[in-house]
Image (tube, rainbow, N blue to C red):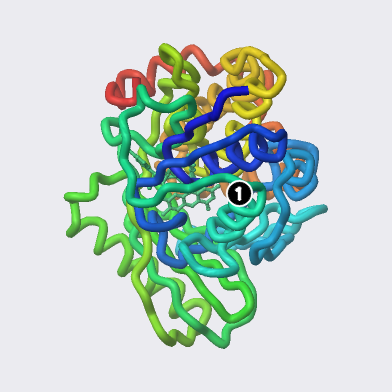
Amino acid sequence: MKKIKILGAGLSGLAAAINLAKAGIEVEVYEKNSDCGMRFHGDMQGLENWSDKEDVLDSLQKMHIDVNFNCTPFRKIILSNCERDDKFSFDRPVFYLVERGNFEGSIDFGLKKQALDAGVKINFDQDIQENNVDIVATGPKFNHIPAAVKGIVFNTKSPNIAVGLVNEKAAYKGYAYLLIANSVACLCSCSALDKTETEKINENFELSKKHFCEKYNLTIKNEKEVGGVGYFSINNIYKKDKNIFVGEAAGIQDFLAGFGMRTAMISGYLAAKSIIENLDYEQLAEKKFGDYIKAGIVNRYIWEHTKIDNYLTVFDKLNEMLKGTSFLYSMYNFNLVQKIEYPIALQYIKKQYPEVL
Ligand SMILES: Cc1cc2nc3c(=O)[nH]c(=O)nc-3n(C[C@H](O)[C@H](O)[C@H](O)COP(=O)(O)OP(=O)(O)OC[C@H]3O[C@@H](n4cnc5c(N)ncnc54)[C@H](O)[C@@H]3O)c2cc1C
């Protein structure tokens, strides 16, 4: 089989590269930065474990991806709206905490190593044209609705914890979070704001920090800034001309909260599978992500209508429903209620965010 060229050495591109190389296909990856993981700087991110009944680590193994990176399971989370803190426990890890960046122990470093070990050639500092490659894995597009994330990572003596904070002043239309695993912490505010709205972004972050510091009596050492921007889209392009699109470049991302690592790796795996087994990638991707994306649209629509009472209705509902991961599974798999609400939700999103189309 001919050599396969991939643009972008993020999680989606590397997942595709690893699978192609393991199937004996020559693979060359072109990455604009000087290393993998340069979009991040030690951020901690949750590898979600609710959108599928299979544990995400088992899914990775089936996708020929080893867990050769730091990965801490979380079975308990706290949700806060500044007024009230509710604790939730799950029957299995609700997510695994991983680190992002170009250092040993991060998921980016781990996947890079697996790709190189499988014989993939990665060309760093190279930004070539999309039409010269087979798979486009270049991450977010910049003409879609933005989400600004401002945060810090630091060392702390505080114990492991995962807290999500929903409050319009701490994270406009979004959420803030405090994640601590093995004495390393990440505290971020993620708002639906453009990166140029610096004053608002800073205010959101400072309020989140104040809340977390006071509430959890945090010790902060070796503070370092992290964060960046994410872009949301409902315009999924899996294939254009001879190019296959994977990960965020295909618009595959959770429209509610921005979880995109798991889907990035799955789409990379599916792209490789389509090439190896001569299958239609568009069909594979639509089957896997079609309902997931529609569910995300309804989730965002509902979310934007529940902020009115500082999310108290959501808290009450979650206390009733969130006994295990099955409610979250249903939320991400286009359940019957979502199917009914979808047409209205889609109209709302199109009107509210014309740029996501
Ligand atoms: C602050 C923040 C927090 C997040 N938290 C979470 C979380 O908790 N859980 C979760 O699941 N997801 C989270 N996400 C989303 C997640 O990080 C992404 O969805 C995921 O990394 C997408 O992978 P990807 O391969 O599609 O793109 P990327 O990881 O962005 O990789 C794209 C790669 O392509 C390279 N590239 C881009 N353009 C070119 C070009 N023209 N030529 C060559 N190379 C190019 C980039 O340098 C990059 O290495 C978060 C995102 C942000 C910004």
| Residue 172 appears in view | no
Residue situated in front as seen by the camera: 181 or 161: 181
Which quadrant of the figure has residue 23?
A: top right
| Residue 41 appears in view | yes
- The image shows residue 14 at horizontal and vertical percentages of 56, 44
- The image shows residue 98 at horizontal and vertical percentages of 59, 61
Crowd around label 1: few <14 · some 14–19 · many ≥20 (10 Å): many
Residue situated in front as seen by the camera: 164 or 320: 164
Residue situated in front as seen by the camera: 51 or 244: 244
**Numbered circles on residues, count:** 1
**Quarter of the image with the C terminus in it:** top left
Say which amino acid is labelled 1. Answer: Ala
Q: Is 177 placed above or below 357 here?
A: below
- The image shows residue 300 at horizontal and vertical percentages of 47, 33
Q: Residue at x 40, y 37 (%)?
A: 138
In the image, taking residue 309 as reference, residue 4 lies left or right, namely right
Q: Is 71 placed above or below 56 here?
A: below
Q: Residue at x 32, y 57 (%)?
A: 169
Q: Is 175 placed above or below 244 here?
A: below
Label 1, on which residue?
Answer: 115
Under 8 Å from ligand 1: the CB of mark 1? Answer: no
**Quarter of the image with the N terminus in it:** top right
Q: Residue at x 56, y 37 (%)?
A: 27
- The image shows residue 271 at horizontal and vertical percentages of 60, 27
In the image, taking residue 145 as reference, residue 218 lies left or right, namely right
Q: Secondary structure at mark 1?
A: helix
Q: Residue at x 27, y 46 (%)?
A: 193
